[in-house]
Image (cartoon, rainbow, N blue to C red):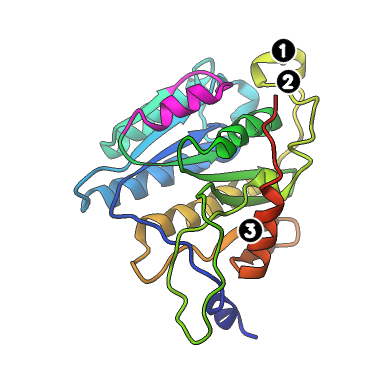
Amino acid sequence: MSATMELKFSHPLRVDNKRPFHFIVIGAGGTGGYLIPNLARLVTSVNAKASSPNRITLIDGDEVEEKNITRQNFIFSDIGKNKAEVLAKRYSTAFGLEITAFPKFLEEEIELGNIMHRHYGFPVVIGCVDNNRTRQMIYNEFLNRRYWFFWLDAGNEQYSGQVVLGYNHPYEIRRPREGMGQLPSDYFLPSVVDLYPDIFEDTEAVFNSELSCAARAVSAPQSINANLTAANIMMNFVATMLTCGDNDGIRTHQVRFNTKNSVITTELNYYDEIIEKTRKSRTGTSVA
Protein backbone atom coordinates (compact mmCIF):
# COMPACT_ATOMS: atom_id res chain seq x y z
CA MET A 1 0.00 0.00 0.00
CA SER A 2 1.36 3.42 -0.93
CA ALA A 3 1.95 6.17 1.61
CA THR A 4 -0.90 8.15 0.01
CA MET A 5 -3.34 5.26 0.42
CA GLU A 6 -2.24 4.66 4.03
CA LEU A 7 -2.87 8.34 4.80
CA LYS A 8 -6.29 8.13 3.15
CA PHE A 9 -7.41 5.33 5.48
CA SER A 10 -6.22 7.09 8.64
CA HIS A 11 -8.88 8.82 10.72
CA PRO A 12 -8.62 12.64 10.78
CA LEU A 13 -8.93 14.46 14.10
CA ARG A 14 -11.11 17.55 13.71
CA VAL A 15 -9.47 20.90 14.41
CA ASP A 16 -11.58 24.03 14.81
CA ASN A 17 -9.13 26.68 13.62
CA LYS A 18 -11.87 29.27 13.22
CA ARG A 19 -11.34 29.73 16.94
CA PRO A 20 -7.93 31.11 17.97
CA PHE A 21 -5.32 28.98 19.71
CA HIS A 22 -3.22 29.77 22.76
CA PHE A 23 0.19 28.13 22.27
CA ILE A 24 1.91 27.53 25.63
CA VAL A 25 5.55 26.55 25.14
CA ILE A 26 7.10 24.98 28.23
CA GLY A 27 10.86 24.99 27.83
CA ALA A 28 12.81 27.55 25.79
CA GLY A 29 16.13 25.72 25.56
CA GLY A 30 17.28 23.09 23.05
CA THR A 31 14.10 22.21 21.13
CA GLY A 32 11.94 25.12 22.31
CA GLY A 33 14.52 27.68 21.28
CA TYR A 34 14.35 26.50 17.66
CA LEU A 35 10.58 26.06 17.63
CA ILE A 36 9.74 29.53 18.96
CA PRO A 37 10.98 31.73 16.04
CA ASN A 38 9.11 29.66 13.45
CA LEU A 39 6.02 29.44 15.65
CA ALA A 40 6.05 33.23 16.00
CA ARG A 41 6.50 33.65 12.25
CA LEU A 42 3.60 31.33 11.41
CA VAL A 43 1.26 32.82 14.04
CA THR A 44 2.02 36.32 12.74
CA SER A 45 1.14 35.21 9.19
CA VAL A 46 -2.11 33.53 10.24
CA ASN A 47 -3.11 36.41 12.54
CA ALA A 48 -2.93 38.83 9.61
CA LYS A 49 -6.08 37.17 8.21
CA ALA A 50 -7.77 36.14 11.47
CA SER A 51 -10.60 37.94 13.25
CA SER A 52 -9.23 36.90 16.67
CA PRO A 53 -5.47 36.60 17.22
CA ASN A 54 -3.66 33.42 18.17
CA ARG A 55 -1.47 33.87 21.27
CA ILE A 56 1.92 32.59 22.42
CA THR A 57 3.17 32.15 26.00
CA LEU A 58 6.72 31.01 26.83
CA ILE A 59 7.59 29.38 30.17
CA ASP A 60 11.10 28.67 31.47
CA GLY A 61 12.87 29.39 34.75
CA ASP A 62 16.35 28.77 33.36
CA GLU A 63 19.02 31.35 32.55
CA VAL A 64 21.25 31.34 29.48
CA GLU A 65 24.72 29.96 30.22
CA GLU A 66 27.88 30.02 28.12
CA LYS A 67 27.56 26.27 27.47
CA ASN A 68 24.18 26.91 25.77
CA ILE A 69 25.61 29.13 23.05
CA THR A 70 26.95 26.36 20.79
CA ARG A 71 23.76 24.24 20.74
CA GLN A 72 20.81 26.44 21.65
CA ASN A 73 19.33 29.49 19.92
CA PHE A 74 21.13 32.14 21.99
CA ILE A 75 24.04 34.55 21.61
CA PHE A 76 26.76 35.72 24.01
CA SER A 77 24.91 38.89 25.01
CA ASP A 78 22.05 36.67 26.31
CA ILE A 79 24.20 35.04 28.99
CA GLY A 80 22.76 35.52 32.48
CA LYS A 81 19.28 36.41 31.19
CA ASN A 82 16.13 34.31 31.46
CA LYS A 83 15.56 32.15 28.36
CA ALA A 84 11.82 32.75 28.07
CA GLU A 85 12.21 36.52 28.43
CA VAL A 86 15.05 36.67 25.89
CA LEU A 87 13.12 34.84 23.18
CA ALA A 88 9.80 36.56 23.93
CA LYS A 89 11.41 39.99 23.55
CA ARG A 90 13.43 39.02 20.47
CA TYR A 91 10.56 37.58 18.44
CA SER A 92 7.83 39.92 19.61
CA THR A 93 10.07 42.74 18.37
CA ALA A 94 10.91 40.93 15.13
CA PHE A 95 7.30 40.17 14.19
CA GLY A 96 5.28 42.81 16.03
CA LEU A 97 3.58 40.02 17.96
CA GLU A 98 2.57 40.00 21.60
CA ILE A 99 4.42 37.11 23.30
CA THR A 100 4.03 36.57 27.05
CA ALA A 101 6.97 35.26 29.08
CA PHE A 102 6.82 33.49 32.45
CA PRO A 103 10.38 33.40 33.81
CA LYS A 104 9.84 30.49 36.20
CA PHE A 105 9.68 26.70 36.24
CA LEU A 106 6.13 25.37 36.01
CA GLU A 107 5.46 22.95 38.87
CA GLU A 108 1.74 22.99 39.74
CA GLU A 109 -1.36 22.03 37.74
CA ILE A 110 -3.20 25.09 39.04
CA GLU A 111 -0.50 27.32 37.52
CA LEU A 112 -0.88 25.57 34.17
CA GLY A 113 -4.66 25.93 34.31
CA ASN A 114 -4.38 29.64 35.09
CA ILE A 115 -1.99 30.18 32.18
CA MET A 116 -4.23 28.23 29.79
CA HIS A 117 -7.04 30.68 30.36
CA ARG A 118 -5.02 33.83 30.70
CA HIS A 119 -5.84 34.45 27.02
CA TYR A 120 -8.95 33.53 25.07
CA GLY A 121 -8.12 30.65 22.76
CA PHE A 122 -8.03 26.87 22.69
CA PRO A 123 -4.99 25.73 24.70
CA VAL A 124 -2.13 23.90 22.98
CA VAL A 125 0.48 22.89 25.56
CA ILE A 126 3.84 22.38 23.83
CA GLY A 127 6.28 20.50 26.02
CA CYS A 128 9.94 21.01 25.15
CA VAL A 129 11.36 19.72 28.41
CA ASP A 130 13.83 17.00 29.37
CA ASN A 131 12.18 16.57 32.77
CA ASN A 132 9.80 13.70 33.55
CA ARG A 133 8.44 15.39 36.68
CA THR A 134 7.14 18.25 34.53
CA ARG A 135 5.56 15.73 32.15
CA GLN A 136 3.89 14.04 35.14
CA MET A 137 2.48 17.40 36.24
CA ILE A 138 1.07 18.10 32.75
CA TYR A 139 -0.34 14.55 32.67
CA ASN A 140 -2.23 15.16 35.91
CA GLU A 141 -3.96 18.13 34.27
CA PHE A 142 -4.49 16.06 31.10
CA LEU A 143 -6.28 13.35 33.12
CA ASN A 144 -8.31 15.74 35.28
CA ARG A 145 -9.96 17.20 32.16
CA ARG A 146 -10.81 20.49 33.83
CA TYR A 147 -9.96 21.91 30.43
CA TRP A 148 -9.76 20.25 27.04
CA PHE A 149 -6.38 20.86 25.43
CA PHE A 150 -3.88 19.52 22.94
CA TRP A 151 -0.58 18.37 24.43
CA LEU A 152 2.30 18.29 21.96
CA ASP A 153 5.44 16.82 23.51
CA ALA A 154 8.97 16.39 22.17
CA GLY A 155 11.57 14.19 23.79
CA ASN A 156 14.97 13.26 22.47
CA GLU A 157 18.29 11.70 23.33
CA GLN A 158 21.58 12.45 21.58
CA TYR A 159 20.46 11.48 18.07
CA SER A 160 16.91 10.12 18.32
CA GLY A 161 13.55 11.07 19.76
CA GLN A 162 9.83 11.38 19.25
CA VAL A 163 7.05 13.96 19.02
CA VAL A 164 3.62 12.94 20.36
CA LEU A 165 0.29 14.74 20.08
CA GLY A 166 -2.28 14.03 22.81
CA TYR A 167 -5.81 15.39 23.15
CA ASN A 168 -7.92 14.86 26.28
CA HIS A 169 -11.31 14.97 24.56
CA PRO A 170 -13.81 12.75 26.46
CA TYR A 171 -15.04 10.79 23.43
CA GLU A 172 -13.36 7.69 22.09
CA ILE A 173 -12.59 7.39 18.40
CA ARG A 174 -15.47 5.79 16.46
CA ARG A 175 -15.07 3.12 13.85
CA PRO A 176 -15.75 4.65 10.42
CA ARG A 177 -18.82 3.27 8.65
CA GLU A 178 -18.07 1.21 5.60
CA GLY A 179 -18.55 3.18 2.43
CA MET A 180 -18.53 6.50 4.29
CA GLY A 181 -15.83 9.09 3.77
CA GLN A 182 -13.26 9.75 6.45
CA LEU A 183 -14.73 12.99 7.77
CA PRO A 184 -12.89 14.67 10.66
CA SER A 185 -14.29 14.11 14.16
CA ASP A 186 -13.39 14.83 17.78
CA TYR A 187 -11.81 12.04 19.80
CA PHE A 188 -9.27 11.29 22.52
CA LEU A 189 -5.61 10.96 21.50
CA PRO A 190 -3.28 9.27 24.02
CA SER A 191 -0.52 11.45 25.44
CA VAL A 192 3.23 10.84 25.56
CA VAL A 193 2.83 9.41 29.09
CA ASP A 194 0.23 6.92 27.84
CA LEU A 195 2.56 5.77 25.07
CA TYR A 196 5.68 5.76 27.25
CA PRO A 197 4.57 4.61 30.73
CA ASP A 198 8.15 4.70 32.06
CA ILE A 199 7.60 8.47 32.36
CA PHE A 200 4.67 7.84 34.72
CA GLU A 201 6.67 5.21 36.64
CA ASP A 202 9.71 7.45 37.18
CA THR A 203 9.32 7.93 40.94
CA GLU A 204 12.74 9.59 41.26
CA ALA A 205 11.90 12.43 38.88
CA VAL A 206 12.14 15.94 40.36
CA PHE A 207 11.44 19.43 39.05
CA ASN A 208 14.37 21.48 37.76
CA SER A 209 14.08 23.84 40.72
CA GLU A 210 14.75 20.91 43.05
CA LEU A 211 18.03 19.97 41.37
CA SER A 212 21.34 21.07 42.83
CA CYS A 213 23.61 23.31 40.75
CA ALA A 214 25.91 20.33 40.18
CA ALA A 215 23.02 18.13 39.01
CA ARG A 216 21.77 20.82 36.62
CA ALA A 217 25.23 21.10 35.12
CA VAL A 218 25.15 17.40 34.17
CA SER A 219 22.68 16.80 31.36
CA ALA A 220 22.23 14.04 28.79
CA PRO A 221 24.07 14.89 25.55
CA GLN A 222 21.88 16.03 22.68
CA SER A 223 22.92 16.91 19.16
CA ILE A 224 21.75 20.13 17.59
CA ASN A 225 20.29 18.05 14.73
CA ALA A 226 18.02 16.18 17.15
CA ASN A 227 16.71 19.45 18.59
CA LEU A 228 16.16 20.95 15.13
CA THR A 229 14.39 17.81 13.89
CA ALA A 230 12.08 17.70 16.91
CA ALA A 231 11.28 21.41 16.48
CA ASN A 232 10.50 20.98 12.77
CA ILE A 233 8.18 18.03 13.42
CA MET A 234 6.36 20.04 16.08
CA MET A 235 5.96 22.85 13.56
CA ASN A 236 4.31 20.41 11.14
CA PHE A 237 1.67 19.59 13.76
CA VAL A 238 1.12 23.28 14.56
CA ALA A 239 0.89 24.23 10.88
CA THR A 240 -1.78 21.56 10.36
CA MET A 241 -3.76 22.91 13.32
CA LEU A 242 -3.65 26.44 11.95
CA THR A 243 -4.27 25.75 8.27
CA CYS A 244 -6.31 22.55 7.80
CA GLY A 245 -9.74 22.87 6.21
CA ASP A 246 -13.17 21.65 7.36
CA ASN A 247 -12.84 18.39 5.45
CA ASP A 248 -9.38 17.55 6.68
CA GLY A 249 -7.69 17.23 10.06
CA ILE A 250 -4.71 15.81 11.92
CA ARG A 251 -4.02 12.28 10.72
CA THR A 252 -0.95 11.42 12.80
CA HIS A 253 -0.31 11.20 16.54
CA GLN A 254 3.37 10.30 16.81
CA VAL A 255 6.54 10.79 14.79
CA ARG A 256 9.78 9.03 15.76
CA PHE A 257 13.13 10.00 14.32
CA ASN A 258 16.80 9.11 14.28
CA THR A 259 19.08 11.81 12.90
CA LYS A 260 22.12 9.51 12.78
CA ASN A 261 20.64 7.39 9.99
CA SER A 262 18.00 9.85 8.70
CA VAL A 263 15.02 7.64 9.58
CA ILE A 264 11.59 9.13 10.36
CA THR A 265 8.63 6.90 11.30
CA THR A 266 5.09 8.27 11.40
CA GLU A 267 2.22 6.64 13.31
CA LEU A 268 -1.13 7.41 11.68
CA ASN A 269 -4.51 7.60 13.40
CA TYR A 270 -5.86 4.14 12.62
CA TYR A 271 -9.00 3.16 14.51
CA ASP A 272 -7.75 -0.15 15.94
CA GLU A 273 -4.47 1.31 17.19
CA ILE A 274 -5.98 4.47 18.67
CA ILE A 275 -8.82 2.67 20.45
CA GLU A 276 -6.38 0.18 22.02
CA LYS A 277 -4.10 2.97 23.26
CA THR A 278 -7.10 4.99 24.45
CA ARG A 279 -8.51 2.19 26.59
CA LYS A 280 -5.11 1.48 28.10
CA SER A 281 -4.79 5.15 29.02
CA ARG A 282 -8.16 5.12 30.84
CA THR A 283 -6.44 3.14 33.61
CA GLY A 284 -3.99 5.99 34.19
CA THR A 285 -3.95 7.75 37.56
CA SER A 286 -2.50 11.03 38.74
CA VAL A 287 1.09 11.26 39.91
CA ALA A 288 1.50 12.53 43.46
Q: Secondary structure at mark 2?
A: helix
Residue of label 1: 213
Q: Does residue 112 show up magenta in the picture?
A: yes
x 28%, y 54%: residue: 18
Depth check, front residue: 52 or 96: 52
Mark pair 3, 2: CA separation: 29 Å
> Quadrant of the image for the N terminus?
bottom right
How many other residues sit within 10 Å of disc 1, few (<14), some (14-19) or many (≥20)?
A: few
As helix, strand or loop, the secondary structure at mark 3 comes to strand
In percent of width and height, residue 244 lies at 37, 63
Which residue is rendered at x = 68% and y = 43% of the image?
Answer: 193
Left or right, 177 with respect to 196, comes to left
Q: List the residue tagged with mark 2.
A: 217
Marks 3, 2: nearer the viewer = 3
Numbered label tally: 3
Q: Nearer the viewer, residue 149 or 158?
A: 149
Q: Residue at x 62, y 36 (%)?
A: 139
Disc 3: CA contacts within 10 A as few (<14), some (14-19) or many (>=20): some
Give the amino acid at mark 2: Ala
Real-space Cα separation, disc 1 to disc 2, in angstroms = 6 Å
Q: Amino acid at mark 1?
A: Cys
Chain part drawn in magenta: 102-119
What is the distance, in whole Å, between disc 1 and disc 3 at their CAs?
Answer: 33 Å
Say if mark 1 contacts mark 2, CB within 8 Å.
yes
Could you tell me residue 190's position as x and y percent? 62, 51
**For residue 131, above or below residue 197:** above
Q: Could you tell which of marks 1 and 3 lies nearer the N-terminus?
A: 1
Read off the residue under disc 3: 255
Q: Tell me which amino acid carries mark 3.
A: Val
Image location (x, y in percent) of residue 202: 79, 32
| Numbered label attached to residue 235 | none
Residue drawn at the location 74% of the way across and 43% of the way down: 157
